[in-house]
């Protein structure tokens, strides 16, 4: 059985789906017997999710958009 | 992720722009301004800086389009220019504070098994997610990442680009992208765990 440390090292590849099937199976076997690693896996995944939801919502503020349009018009197009 | 269609559209726009079409440049401006701004903003967390970077990048695209050879995707080229401009901006501002990223791992015993109980807060975050406090905590935690890990994390997990795309933009190997991504996630997971555990304690005490 692989240990928790190895398990955590493999998480990134596990989510990318790039583990060979033997390794993926031993990882899943480990999860069956190890609640701490399941919690770790869930919170590892949720970390990416929460950060994406929080940070990907960036929109350009109206005032900045206005300045960008001016910039393109005056500094780029009329040069 | 850019679809095949978007890639073809980019290629046409680049070709037209090289031939001097202002409409093509306008279209590129329209398509890319948010991507450029969002990346610059997440890296600097400053509206003025993100605006400066975006202007810089637009000017560079306009002036240097002839040097773009099409060996990589146009979008990768734009991301690279954006990061270069962002680094220039950051360099004039702060010295890099060094943070050790080792702290993201749990405690293991000598056989490599976990000693401590790991709380699973992954299901209970909905009510907290949109609070300003949570948002600020996440922004601060991401800000604490060293630049190398931060940029990989933002491109891959926030912008949702593929690992291969991130490799192309940063000119790294796939294992290097994954190892930086993994370190960033471990570090952030730890920060989020502390925060949500603390919340749990606070709400049970009430
Ligand atoms: Zn385990």
Image (tube, grey):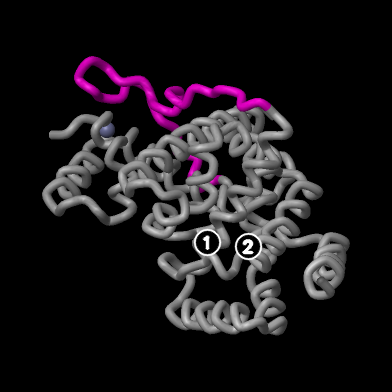
Q: Is residue B76 magenta?
A: no
| Mark drawn on residue B204 | none
In the displayed structure, B202 sits above or below B25; it is above
Left or right of B9, for residue B26: right
The quarter in which the C terminus of chain B is drawn is top right
Tag 1's secondary structure?
helix
Residue with the mark numbered 2: B35
Left or right of B183, for residue A27: left
Question: In the depicted view, which residue is nearer to us: B10 or B117?
Answer: B10
Quadrant for ligand 1 reads top left
In the displayed structure, B200 sits above or below B129; it is above
Residue B110 at x, y = what percent?
A: 23, 15
Q: Residues within 10 Å of mark 2 (few under 14, many from 20)?
A: many
Residue B129 at x, y = what percent?
A: 64, 49
Q: Is residue B113 magenta?
A: yes
Disc 2 versus disc 1: distance between alpha carbons? Answer: 13 Å
Quarter assignment of residue B205: top right
In the displayed structure, B5 sits above or below B109; it is below
Tag 2's secondary structure?
helix
Residue with the mark numbered 1: B77
Question: In the depicted view, which residue is nearer to us: B71 or B130?
Answer: B71
Magenta segment:
B95-124
Chain of the residue that carries numbered disc 1 in the rendered image: B
Q: Main secondary structure of the magenta part?
A: loop
Q: Comparing marks 2 and 1, which lies closer to the viewer?
A: 1
């Amino acid at each position: 059985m692989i240990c928790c440390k190895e398990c955590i090292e493999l998480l990134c590849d596990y989510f990318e789906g790039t583990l060979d099937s033997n390794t993926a199976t031993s990882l899943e076997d480990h999860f069956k017997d190890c609640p701490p690693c399941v919690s770790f896996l869930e919170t590892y995944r949720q970390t990416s999710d929460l950060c994406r939801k929080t940070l990907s919502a960036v929109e350009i503020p109206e005032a900045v958009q206005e300045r960008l349009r001016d910039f393109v018009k005056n500094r780029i197009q009329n040069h | 992720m850019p679809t095949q269609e978007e890639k073809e559209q980019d290629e046409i726009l680049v070709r037209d722009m090289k031939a001097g079409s202002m409409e093509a440049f306008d279209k590129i401006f329209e398509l890319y301004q948010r991507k450029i701004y969002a990346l610059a903003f997440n890296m600097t967390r400053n509206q003025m800086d993100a605006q400066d970077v975006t202007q810089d990048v637009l000017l560079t695209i306009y002036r240097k389009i002839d040097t773009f050879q099409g060996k990589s995707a146009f979008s990768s080229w734009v991301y690279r220019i954006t990061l270069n401009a962002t680094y220039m901006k950051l360099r004039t501002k702060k010295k890099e504070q060094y943070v050790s990223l080792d702290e993201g791992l749990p405690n293991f015993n000598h056989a490599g098994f976990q000693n401590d109980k790991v709380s699973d807060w992954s299901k209970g975050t909905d009510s907290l997610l949109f609070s300003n406090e949570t948002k600020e905590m996440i922004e601060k935690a991401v800000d604490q990442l060293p630049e190398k890990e931060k940029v990989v994390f933002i491109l891959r997990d926030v912008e949702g680009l593929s690992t291969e795309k991130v490799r192309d933009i940063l000119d790294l190997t796939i294992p290097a992208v994954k190892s930086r991504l993994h370190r960033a996630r471990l570090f952030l997971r730890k920060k989020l765990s502390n925060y949500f555990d603390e919340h749990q304690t606070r709400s049970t005490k009430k």
